[in-house]
Image (spheres, helix red, strand yellow):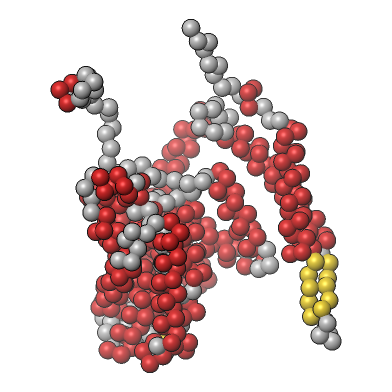
């Protein structure tokens, strides 16, 4: 007879002070070595051209102290939250309100987003920031189809963003087509290039897939730079038309929307209109993605993400599954690119570098691959965080990297990790003994 296994108690999770301080001291020493040459000593060109150096030992000491204190806090929080299967310090009376709060995040965030132009009508900066955040939310949801649902690593997603932007810019400036006509065309063209990218990577996984997609993104950017007769090369495309409201321009003239409504014209009208346009596009992306997840193709994406070999064994056509994932994600990227072009009125190759792909991929990974709400929260945190630390330009990337490390420690699957299958049996079901050799299933 085996002895009963003792249940975990709060006493068994008492903090080991010596171990915590040892880890904090090691982290501080590592930070001292890493940042000694990065922050402690700064080199500059002198008046006569010679190399001089300046010391910033005070800043170095502050960072090392912050790492030491942060390491202690991390270990204490790790003990607080605890691994799965242990008793958490959070009392049951608090767990229920937290669950209600988690369920209320999405509707509250959506209602607040609808009211942003009303609340901040006179604050142009916040409206522009909201448009930027929603653009990256849409890009994140588009890439989430490829990375989060199908499990295919795409480092060249900015290529579809660029295809959509240049498709709208060239069609609108050369043929005089409106935004609403060019918008679906931009999505279709981006989806076509997504299918073209899907063919070379049908049998690739992991590092090889990342290399091919990264190369594809760079190829598109280099083509845009060098095909000057079509794209304008480094000079870009200017004079891109703005969208209209059912054919009515948002201009101060007599034929403008303000004049027809009998109200005073304000440049903010166009910004508010663009805000709701990108909000509608983002919600459309979210709605289509959620519906596709419940269809057979969405379940095929999830099966491909979990195990490609098992996916083939089930009779799923992995070729079609991969191509549809790339085409769908690329279409949403193209739609976002068309909006970016009409929002800016000018586009150039500098707007479609690898850094954009890395930023969108970071949003998907940090938000939680497969989680729509997580991607939205990650986009809000990252884009808003960059703006929050804009005054600390020298240190904001350091803070951003530290936040990513802490998130990977506590939430390795992202803010809202969601890998649960769309369809599953809610209750266990017995199998008839006639169907198995072992007897009752």
Compared with residue 190, is residue 290 higher up or lower down, i.e. above or below? above
**Viewer-nearest residue: 160 or 62:** 160
Q: Is residue 165 rendered to the left or right of residue 384?
A: left
Does the image show residue 263? Answer: no
Looking at this view, name the residue that lies furthest to the left: 434
Report the quarter where the C terminus lies: top left
421 lies left or right of 376 = left
**Residue 267 spot, x, y in % from top left:** 44, 79
The extreme top residue here reads 1
Q: Indicate the position of residue 38 as horizontal and vertical percent values.
A: 74, 64
Residue 40 at least partly seen: yes
In which quadrant of the rendered view does residue 364 lie?
bottom left
Residue at (65% x, 42% y) in the render: 74
The residue at the point 43 percent across, 56 percent down is 206
Quadrant of residue 191 within the rendered picture: bottom left
Q: Is residue 136 above or below residue 370?
A: below
**How far across and how far down the image is residue 141, in percent?**
38, 59
Q: How many marks?
A: 0
Relative to 2, 334 lies left or right: left
Residue visible at 53% across and 60% down in the picture? 382
Question: Which residue is depicted at the point 83% across and 82% down?
Answer: 50
Q: Nearer the viewer, residue 307 or 147?
A: 307
Horizontal and vertical percent for residue 344?
A: 44, 79
């Amino acid at each position: 007879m085996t002895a009963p296994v003792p249940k975990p108690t709060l006493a068994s999770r008492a903090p080991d002070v010596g171990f915590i301080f040892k880890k904090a001291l090691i982290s501080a020493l590592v930070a001292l070595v890493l940042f000694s040459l990065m922050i402690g000593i700064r080199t500059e060109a002198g008046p006569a051209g010679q190399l001089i150096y300046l010391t910033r030992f005070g800043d170095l000491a502050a960072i090392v102290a912050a790492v030491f204190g942060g390491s202690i806090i991390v270990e204490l929080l790790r003990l607080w939250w605890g691994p799965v299967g242990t008793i958490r310090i959070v009392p049951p009376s608090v767990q229920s309100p937290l669950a209600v709060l988690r369920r209320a995040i999405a509707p509250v965030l959506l209602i607040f987003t609808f009211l942003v132009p009303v609340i901040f009508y006179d604050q142009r900066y916040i409206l522009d920031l909201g448009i930027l955040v929603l653009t990256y939310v849409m890009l994140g949801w588009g890439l989430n189809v490829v990375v989060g649902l199908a499990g295919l690593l795409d480092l060249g997603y900015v290529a579809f963003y660029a295809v959509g932007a240049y498709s709208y810019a060239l069609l609108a400036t050369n043929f005089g087509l409106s935004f609403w006509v060019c918008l679906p065309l931009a999505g279709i063209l981006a989806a076509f290039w997504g299918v073209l990218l899907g063919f070379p990577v049908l049998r690739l996984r992991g590092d090889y897939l990342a290399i091919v997609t990264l190369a594809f993104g760079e190829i598109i950017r280099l083509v845009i730079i060098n095909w000057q007769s079509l794209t304008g090369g480094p000079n870009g495309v200017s004079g891109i038309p703005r969208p209209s409201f059912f054919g009515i321009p948002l201009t101060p003239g007599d034929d403008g929307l303000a004049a027809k409504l009998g109200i005073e014209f304000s440049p903010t009208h166009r910004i508010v209109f663009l805000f709701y346009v990108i909000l509608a596009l983002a919600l459309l992306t979210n709605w289509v993605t959620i519906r596709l997840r419940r269809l057979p193709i969405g379940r095929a994406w999830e099966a491909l993400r979990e195990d490609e070999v098992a996916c083939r064994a089930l009779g799923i056509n992995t070729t079609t599954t991969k191509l549809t994932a790339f085409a769908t994600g690329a279409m949403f990227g193209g739609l976002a690119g068309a909006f970016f072009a009409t929002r800016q009125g000018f586009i150039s190759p500098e707007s479609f570098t690898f850094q954009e792909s890395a930023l969108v991929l970071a949003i998907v990974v940090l938000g939680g691959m497969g989680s729509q709400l997580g991607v939205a929260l990650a986009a809000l945190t990252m884009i808003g965080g960059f703006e929050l630390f804009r005054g600390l330009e020298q240190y904001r990337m350091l803070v951003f990297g530290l936040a990513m490390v802490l998130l990977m420690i506590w939430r390795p699957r992202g803010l809202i990790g969601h890998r649960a299958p769309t369809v599953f049996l809610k209750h266990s079901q017995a199998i008839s003994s006639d169907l198995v050799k072992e007897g009752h299933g």
